[in-house]
Image (cartoon, coloured by chain):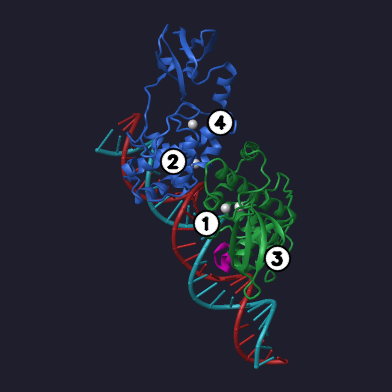
Chain colours: A green, B blue, C cyan, D red
Amino acid sequence: MTLTTAEENYLKAIYHLSDGATKSVSTNDVAAEMKTKPASVSDMLRKLGDKEVIEYRKYYGVNITEEGKKLALQTIRKHRLWEVFLVEKLQFAWDEVHEVAEELEHIQSPLLIQRLDSYLNFPKFDPHGDPIPDEYGDVRARPRLALNEMEVDQSGQIVAVKDSSAAFLKYLDKVGAYIGARIKVLDKVEFDGSMEILVDQKKTLFMSKDVAANILAIQS
Amino acid sequence: MTLTTAEENYLKAIYHLSDGATKSVSTNDVAAEMKTKPASVSDMLRKLGDKEVIEYRKYYGVNITEEGKKLALQTIRKHRLWEVFLVEKLQFAWDEVHEVAEELEHIQSPLLIQRLDSYLNFPKFDPHGDPIPDEYGDVRARPRLALNEMEVDQSGQIVAVKDSSAAFLKYLDKVGAYIGARIKVLDKVEFDGSMEILVDQKKTLFMSKDVAANILAIQS
DNA sequence: AAATATTTTTAGCTATATCTAAATAAATAT
DNA sequence: ATATTTATTTAGATATAGCTAAAAATATTT
Ligand SMILES: [Mn+2]
Ligand SMILES: [Mn+2]
Ligand SMILES: [Mn+2]
Ligand SMILES: [Mn+2]
């Protein structure tokens, strides 16, 4: 089965919205995610259904098939490998990689991806902490916890961000939060859920609940 | 002016056929080069004419404009930089890079190309010996001579290939001809133009006129 | 100069991917 | 149970990029 660039983008969006192929996804949700109109989505869902990468029941949303999941994970693998390349080799900042990776992920060449993976030393995570599926689509996911779900006095390490927008990433750069940082929850304000976080045993950070909810950590 | 992928491919083909924007190019020639039908070419020439990257006079072929030449050279620059990347960093063979570079050249990101150029140490030639235009479109071209135009006893160095097809490149690999090899013409058969070439002062190579015409050298 | 051959363009069709507006199905509220 | 609201699909456009077949322009031959 071979997909067009547009089809790959839709399938990836559906995969993300379906929480890794677990839940069904509505036409409107896909339209919002893809920044297109529901009418365009209906059309595309019919096509993806015909290609059997999704199961499409009119008016009742879609579910990804096994085949679809595999293809979506291949595209995600390519996207994340390219992001690693851009950051590690071409000195891109982590907030500059997304759009370019969005194009690079559609280059059709198994050899290219195999060699790129090897050249990057088989990275397991992208610059935003998201896991890179292997060539069979297997993802070794770590249990991750949003900072706002951690309790006072708990310690851990930042491993990923939920929001990868440039605005959010630049903000994290500015305040000195980064992937790999050791953290400890010093305080949690009940009123608004804002938090006080100790970073690397030396720097104290105040953040809104909204920010905390977009930083993912493993507990230690 | 921004071009679609198809438009970039056509413009690049027209640039090559026009010998670097010097001669005018016919519809049929473009069709042959692009492996499409003349009817499709007529359509595309109208579009490229509207965008003023070519000057199109119906029935009389096209000439590239200054703007078109600049855009074509940008695409060629990207194509060749990616080829260098694939060979130098990802261990592609020189006969494996063309198709992938044909896709990669259309990725839209000035930062990406600037960084790639720097990462590769500002290479001046691609794996086939073709010059890489700088970001302003300037090409520092070396005077090159096809082997079949060299005389007996003349020496030189292989600097490029005219034909970059996998078949030809694999043949050169097999017989041990490569870019950078020092050569000397030992014999030239008048009857069929075939030649005897000494490579690196140790290996003797027999080649048809056809092969010789596709190997480019500088004299020394 | 006329006939013929070649080249190029136009007309009309297909496929992808988008849109707006209208129709219809499903969900919710009265 | 009906009416209303919301979600989704369909119908009909537009734009890109290709095709075949027919028409028209140009080039070549007689
Ligand atoms: Mn994409
Ligand atoms: Mn990422
Ligand atoms: Mn190309
Ligand atoms: Mn090349």
Of the two numbered discs 1 and 3 in the rendering, the one whose residue sits closer to the viewer:
3
**In the rendered structure, the residue with mark 1 lies on which chain?**
A
- In-image side of A196 versus B84 (left or right): right
SS type, badge 4: helix
Same chain for marks 1 and 3? Answer: yes
**In the rendered structure, the residue with mark 2 lies on which chain?**
B
Please say if A75 is above or below A109.
below
Mark 2 within 8 Å of ligand 3, using the beta carbon: yes
Instruction: Give the Cα distance between marks 2 and 4.
Output: 19 Å
* Residue A46 shows up from this direction: yes
Say what amino acid the circle numbered 3 marks.
Answer: Val
Q: In the rendered image, which residue does mark 2 sit on?
A: B75
Q: In the rendered image, which residue does mark 4 sit on?
A: B87
Instruction: Give the Cα distance between marks 3 and 2.
Output: 55 Å
Q: In the rendered image, which residue does mark 3 sit on?
A: A152
On the image, the x and y values in percent for residue B109 come to 47, 47
Say what amino acid the circle numbered 2 marks.
Answer: Thr
